[in-house]
Image: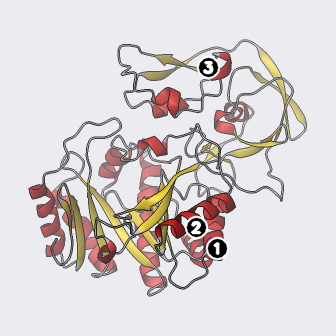
Amino acid sequence: MTYVAKHEPLKCHRCGACMELVACPGADEMVCIGCGACVITCPHQAIELITSKREKKISIYVNEEKFKVPELISVKEALVELGYQIKDHFAESGLFAPCQIGGCYSCVMMIDGKAKPICITRVREGMKINTTLPREYTPLRIVTNFTGHPTGGVGTPWEFKTGQDIIEVGCYAAGCNFRCPTCQNWFVTYLGREEPKTPYEAAKILSEVRKDYGVDRMFISGGECTLNKPWLVQFIRELKKLNPDPAAHFHVDTNGSLLDFAYLDELMEAGMTDIGIDLKALQTETFMHITGLQGKTKAEKFKETAWKAVNYLVNTYEGKVFVGVGIPYNKELITLEEITMMGRQLLKISPFLQVSVLNYRGEFRKNIAIPTTKEMKEVFQVLKDTGLKNVTVQTKNGIIGPRGK
Ligand code: FES
């Protein structure tokens, strides 16, 4: 099946996202290859994919074997036409293409001798695709906004959060495997129109920014920074190499959905010292509602993996890694009862776990009012009442922490 994007002018707000963020593979020649990157990115859902028949066929070479595929499609779609399967992170074989907007570079293959993301690369007559990356390939990823931060992230210990001084420096990786209608950082999440960086380049920039700000903590967030495992592991390893002093901290903020035990072990071995895992929900229906994920089995797997990751880190690496847990709150997304149930589950892992509740506001595709300070105080209270000792909540007027404001 081939597709083409259909623009609905009446829904369009002319916000510019499709021009500024989307790495449209057909933009130069004003053709659409139906990759869907603009559909995923448009905050107003003014673009949809409709089926379209591509009569003309072109020849491509996959691992030196010649095939005929429809013209004006992405390499990923061409490979699917040829029988390749799309896989999730956990499967042994198949194409791993979690973001679909050209941000994470997990789907990179060698195309005419260059490493390119297959989700947003257009097939061309005579194109040579090699599905195996060469040994010397250095992972790539779009990573942006290297700067100082006054509040850090979910994996920042509460004591540091003065809200005034810069306490961490960080950067943000593009691409996500979730489709949260309230994505709180969608300008980065859906950013495909930027040159990717190697882990060495990104670690060097962040280390320089650390020097500029004179802080010890360095973080990476997103988007979802864990999508491209070789990139992230190498990035942390390189950061540690460039910052060998004992005060340096390497902090990963993530949705945790891909962090199986082997991945966590690799991050720990690379030098990760702090991690914030955003758990989103306890019930699968709520999780799907918040993340925009469609398939129940996949959503459940992601949710369970994130919860297990918290448990594993706390029990296996006690004293070696700081673990913070994030929970989004907005009454439109999750009930206080479910927050309470989450608190009870987290208590079983450790009463001293830092649990940060983020006051989700209307962003991206969902327009919801930011919770009032009174509502966030209620959330704080129900979590404290479960017995958790280290709860913080974000309010419009600042952070409430274990020892008050
Ligand atoms: S799936 Fe292609 S870049 Fe992320």
Query: In the image, which disc is placed on residue 313?
Result: none
Relative to 102, 361 lies left or right? left
Q: Residues within 10 Å of mark 1 (few under 14, many from 20)?
A: some
Q: Quadrant of residue 127?
A: top right
| Residue 122 image-quadrant placement | top right
* Residue on which disc 2 sits: 207
Whichever of labels 1 and 2 marks the residue nearer the N terminus, that label is: 2
Image quadrant in which the C terminus is located: bottom left
Comes first in the chain, label 3 or label 2: 3
Instruction: Answer with the quadrant where ligand 1 appears in the image.
Output: top right
* Residue 242 disc label: 1
Three-letter code, disc 1: Leu
Q: Disc 1, disc 2: CB below 8 Å?
A: yes
Residue 32: which disc?
3
Q: Position of residue 384 (x, y in %)?
A: 16, 74
Tell me the element at label 1: helix
Relative to 294, say whether 6 is above or below. Answer: above
